[in-house]
Amino acid sequence: MPNKLSSGDLKRASKLKIIAGQWRSRQVLFAPTPGLRPTGNRGRERLFNWLGADIRGAHCADLFAGSGALTFEAASRGAATCIAIDNHPLALEWLAYNAQQLRAEQVLCRCGDSLELLKTPPARPMDVVFIDPPFALNCSSEACHKLEQYDWLADNAMMYVELPKDNEGFYPPTNWQLWRQQINGDVDSRLYKRIEPPS
């Protein structure tokens, strides 16, 4: 993707730092887009502590990539590949810019509606999937079930989901086991393990 960002865009950009790994302390730049809610430092540190060594060599998908916080943290910590999906062209420009600056060849940026893109299975199943859509979309359950329906997941895949604390309508696939959970403020963070293929 050709880069269209100007020097003014770069000066006005919001910033976050990669916490650990190959690009520790390097900055990721982004601009606000509708519903954008980057996972903060504490949330990312907790998530990747949960994942531990499982992130190394993993094939990952970030279904609502936004700022790219989870994508670039995963790649920095040794993920083999990470598909970063977002439907906002500006978000994709920043994702591509950051991937270029970091020389993150393992990051593949894709523009589109995740719920539609999930209907096309990937070349290989994913080991780790990040599901963190804007809360107003209320589409986490649908995204999770499409991952199963369209064969996106490896047998022992792990799925990270961020939900609003008061969300009572979320229902994961029956073969997902809740492995870790933390509620901070208005955000309910959950890590699931895929324990068996759906019946």
Image (cartoon, grey):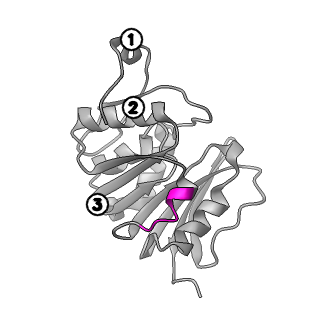
Which is more N-terminal, label 3 or label 2? Answer: 3
Is 199 part of what is drawn in magenta?
A: no
Quadrant (top left/top right/bottom left/bottom right) for the N terminus: top left
Residue 78, percent across and down? 26, 54
Label for residue 56?
A: 3
What is the residue that sits farthest to the bottom in this orientation? 199
Label for residue 30?
A: none
Residue behind mark 2: 94
Q: Main secondary structure of the magenta part?
A: loop
Boundaries of the magenta span = 116-121
Q: How many marks?
A: 3
Residue behind mark 1: 8
Q: Quadrant of residue 199?
A: bottom right
Residue 39, percent across and down? 51, 41
Residue 184, percent across and down? 64, 45
Helix, strand or loop status at disc 3: loop
Mark 2: few/some/many CA within 10 Å (<14, 14-19, 20+) = many
For the residues marked 2 and 1, what is the alpha-carbon distance in whole angstroms?
14 Å
| Image height of 81 relative to 8, above or below | below
The three-letter amino acid code for the residue at tag 2 is Trp
| Image height of 44 relative to 145, above or below | above
Q: Indicate left or right for 22 with 131 as reference.
A: left
For the residues marked 2 and 3, what is the alpha-carbon distance in whole angstroms?
25 Å
The three-letter amino acid code for the residue at tag 1 is Gly
The three-letter amino acid code for the residue at tag 3 is Arg
